[in-house]
Image: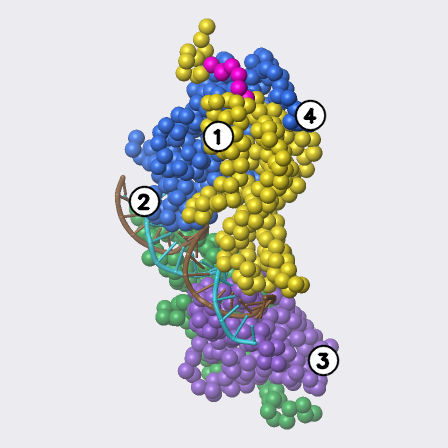
Chain colours: A yellow, B blue, C purple, D green, E brown, F cyan
Amino acid sequence: MASGTKNNDKKDRILDAAVRVFARNGFFNSKVSEIAKEANVADGTIYLYFKSKDDILISLFEEKMSQIILQMTENLRGVSDPREKLRICIRTHLEIMKENHDLAVVITVELRQSAKFMKEYDNRPFSRYLKILSDILQEGKQSRVFRADLTPGMLARALFGMLDELSLWLVMGAAKNKVDWNKAHKELTEFFLRAVSPGEPTQQENSVPDSR
Amino acid sequence: MASGTKNNDKKDRILDAAVRVFARNGFFNSKVSEIAKEANVADGTIYLYFKSKDDILISLFEEKMSQIILQMTENLRGVSDPREKLRICIRTHLEIMKENHDLAVVITVELRQSAKFMKEYDNRPFSRYLKILSDILQEGKQSRVFRADLTPGMLARALFGMLDELSLWLVMGAAKNKVDWNKAHKELTEFFLRAVSPGEPTQQENSVPDSR
Amino acid sequence: MASGTKNNDKKDRILDAAVRVFARNGFFNSKVSEIAKEANVADGTIYLYFKSKDDILISLFEEKMSQIILQMTENLRGVSDPREKLRICIRTHLEIMKENHDLAVVITVELRQSAKFMKEYDNRPFSRYLKILSDILQEGKQSRVFRADLTPGMLARALFGMLDELSLWLVMGAAKNKVDWNKAHKELTEFFLRAVSPGEPTQQENSVPDSR
Amino acid sequence: MASGTKNNDKKDRILDAAVRVFARNGFFNSKVSEIAKEANVADGTIYLYFKSKDDILISLFEEKMSQIILQMTENLRGVSDPREKLRICIRTHLEIMKENHDLAVVITVELRQSAKFMKEYDNRPFSRYLKILSDILQEGKQSRVFRADLTPGMLARALFGMLDELSLWLVMGAAKNKVDWNKAHKELTEFFLRAVSPGEPTQQENSVPDSR
DNA sequence: CATGAATGAGCTTTCATTCAT
DNA sequence: AATGAATGAAAGCTCATTCAT
């Protein structure tokens, strides 16, 4: 049993080291040997657990995104109001990122990078993440809690964009105080819920802009 | 005249080639020699116009972001309603990205990457871009067209995040139809204007969640 | 034991290869890859033992000059007469150079080159070498075996210049016979000892040149 | 006539610039473009006067060494005593080097380097220089002013080695005072003349070394 | 399983040289 | 003759990956 967990031990140590190193230097500027040193293993050992440097990044996503999704799913358990659900999603995302700066940087920065070089890999965990958001929106739409004219898939993406960008911003302003995170949380929630709630439409740009 | 433009010609040719190549492979996987070939110049020629490979990326931002800002400023000229101004910003951003897929990918993906290696360089053009959005929000806030409790700096960033993420999404869905861009445009505008307009606040998460 | 010497083995193999290659082409015309091939290691291996190409040259001096100094010190052991000491120095220098043509060329040629790029490094081993000669001269001066009016530091340098130039000359006349080395040895010794021995001064140039 | 000297003007300007630049950086670290800038000509212009970068160095020797030889020959005119002749040679060599530090560095350092890459070119001017010294020694030997057992060719080389090494030493000790040059001059002359003058032989090493 | 010395392909950058003007 | 922008070969160095121990 001890040896059974050892493996995971070592694999996790490598992944944890990788998050730190990638966050510090970016994926491309990180050396495998630096990850090895940070994880207290030999260079070659890394290749017992990962096929390649790329594979470390991919596994990192799989692992960490799965954790995020797990956490989110857990937090959503028993909640039925779509508006509340959205609040929870926003809070969970920001909390996780706040808790783990390095992870935030890697997810945020390298996820984009990976949009390229992982084209084929198509990033299932990320899709599942988006699906959670998009399902909530769909659900609220059907129960008339949200506007009828919104496109769940697109807005899910928009919401992620907002969360992601703000996380990066907050994380980058390293020494900044806790207040910002709370404020961001409150404001984003308010902002998003207003945007998806039913009510008077705004004037459409194409229809007589700047009229009267 | 021809010789007068020669220099700019060549520098621009290199920059244009770089956008294409970076979009194709990402910055780190792009070889200077590939840019040179794409620009129909010799490898060494690139170093007559740029100090290094990094400098190409930086110049690219400076140049292209400046163009975007210029375009945006131009489109905003003569408009005074902050809501209309926001509509214009959103439209301009999406239009430019739609027009130039490669540029969108590079700005979108590599800007993040650069969040690292350009930390010192601090990205003036991007700051100016954000300032435009943030100024509009501030303005609308003061003239009571927008909610009094919004934080312009943060929302500007959130808006950029949305636009950026959706651009990436639309651009990546390469073969997708034109409709998506229009739909995205309309929906985003509606979405954002609702969110910033004054009106009944939504229930705050902490106050009796899940209540009526 | 075998594995204990492995490291030194490889480092020495590289240094030995470097002497040969530098002697053949000169430092600047020598390619690292050529050294690698000559040492039967991969290009990259060299950088496990040396920081840079420059570092190879510097290490070479440190190593080889130290050997020369060691040899010289050993040969001088137990000898007290300064004149005999000088004879031994001259013999040792010429013998080592004769024994190792490549080393002679590198020391002789590149030491000068290095006078430039090693200005900061200031070449301790070479200084130690000069000090040996200069100490002997000083000693002989004090014991009245040598002239009272000689300047040890300067003459040490002059002696080195002679030895170095003659070594180069002899080494360059590659196919030349052994006799030359012996003759050079005898003549130089005689020459130098005469020059430093006390006795009637020669007429000084400024005092009635071309007189009588 | 004006245009007739223009050419030489420009060629000389390039050579003068080259001495300065080579002295500053060494031959291999000097860029043709730097020489061009220092000479106030375009890069391409250099190739109207010289076949290659190597050719600049070779021409430099030809030119400058010829000047040295010319000067020496001139100073020797009318002098018949071989001892006085040697005094003059030593003085001339040191004076020229003292006068022109850059030239000294280049001759001194790069002449060695060239010993390699000019192997084929075989350096006639340098040979002529050595012949002057060697002829004087031969002459003095025949007229019994110098020892009968000296080898002119070898001693000429040794003398050059001494002069060269001391020049380098004095030149390198940049800020040093004028006195050093004078002292070096006096001491070297005394030293060399003693060494070549007839008189009691010193004990030979092989004959009873360390004896009474 | 673990190691880390060794590998070598591949990159950025430099710079002597050319040639259209 | 003079220019200097353009060329492109060439080389130092890095680092992901392998494999003998």
Q: Is residue A200 located in the magenta-colored stretch of the structure?
A: yes
Picture disc at residue C144: 3
Residue carrying label 4: B208
Distance between the alpha carbons at the discs numbered 2 and 4:
66 Å
- Name the residue type under label 2: Asn
- Mark in front: 3 vs 2: 2
Distance between the alpha carbons at the discs numbered 4 and 3:
108 Å
Residue lying at 64% horizontally and 78% vertically, measured from the top left: C70
- Name the residue type under label 1: Pro
Picture disc at residue B40: 2
Residue carrying label 1: A152
Distance between the alpha carbons at the discs numbered 3 and 2:
78 Å
Q: Is residue D144 located in the magenta-colored stretch of the structure?
A: no
- Mark in front: 2 vs 1: 1
Distance between the alpha carbons at the discs numbered 1 and 3:
104 Å
- Mark in front: 1 vs 3: 1
Say if labels 2 and 4 share a chain. Answer: yes
| Magenta region, residue range | A196-203
- Residue A92 or residue C206, whichever sits in front: A92
In the rendered image, the residue lying farthest to the top is A212
In screen coordinates, is D94 left or right of D52?
right
